[in-house]
Image (tube, helix red, strand yellow):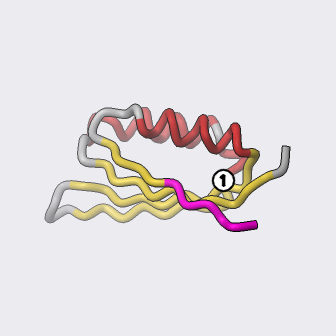
Amino acid sequence: MENRIVLIGIIVENEDSVEKLNQILHEYRSYIIGRMGIPYKEKNISIISVSLDAPENVISSVSGKIGMLDGVTSKTIYTKK
């Protein structure tokens, strides 16, 4: 299966889900190109972007697991290539 480059945008509104989110990202660390997290203290949320180079089944797995976390919203953007 061919790899795709994606960007997953994540907003964390429930601080209790941060540890689970980090466990998921650690599990798929070999596919992660980079990540950036911005704590927005005034709104009590975290904004995270994660870039991946991975097969589509791995991307779907990561996205699905993140999307199931309580108080976490995510959106995956795929490259056209």
Position of 66 with respect to 52 (left or right) is left
Vertical order, 68 against 32 (above or below)? above
Residues in magenta?
A: 76-81
The residue that label 1 is drawn on is 32
Q: Quadrant of residue 14?
A: top left
Disc 1 residue type (three-letter): Ile
Q: Residue at x 46, y 39 (%)?
A: 66
Pointer 1 local density, CA inside 10 Å: few below 14, some 14–19, many at least 20: some
Q: Residue 21 location, x and y as percent?
A: 44, 39
Q: Quadrant of the N terminus?
A: top right
The verdict on residue 77 being magenta is: yes
For image coordinates 37% across by 40% down, the residue present is 18
For label 1, the SS is strand
Instruction: Give percent across and percent down for residue 7.
Output: 56, 61
Residue drawn 24% across the image and 47% down it:
13
Residue 57 screen position, x and y as percent: 70, 38
Residue 48 location, quadrant: bottom left
User: From this viewpoint, which residue is outermost toward the front?
Assistant: 80
Q: Is residue 30 magenta?
A: no
Task: Give the camera-side residue of 52 and 80.
Answer: 80
The quarter of the picture where the C terminus appears is bottom right
Tell which of 20 and 51 is nearer to you: 51
Figure disc tally: 1
- Image point (66%, 53%), residue name: 32
Farthest-out residue, right: 1
Q: Position of residue 71 (x, y in %)?
A: 27, 40
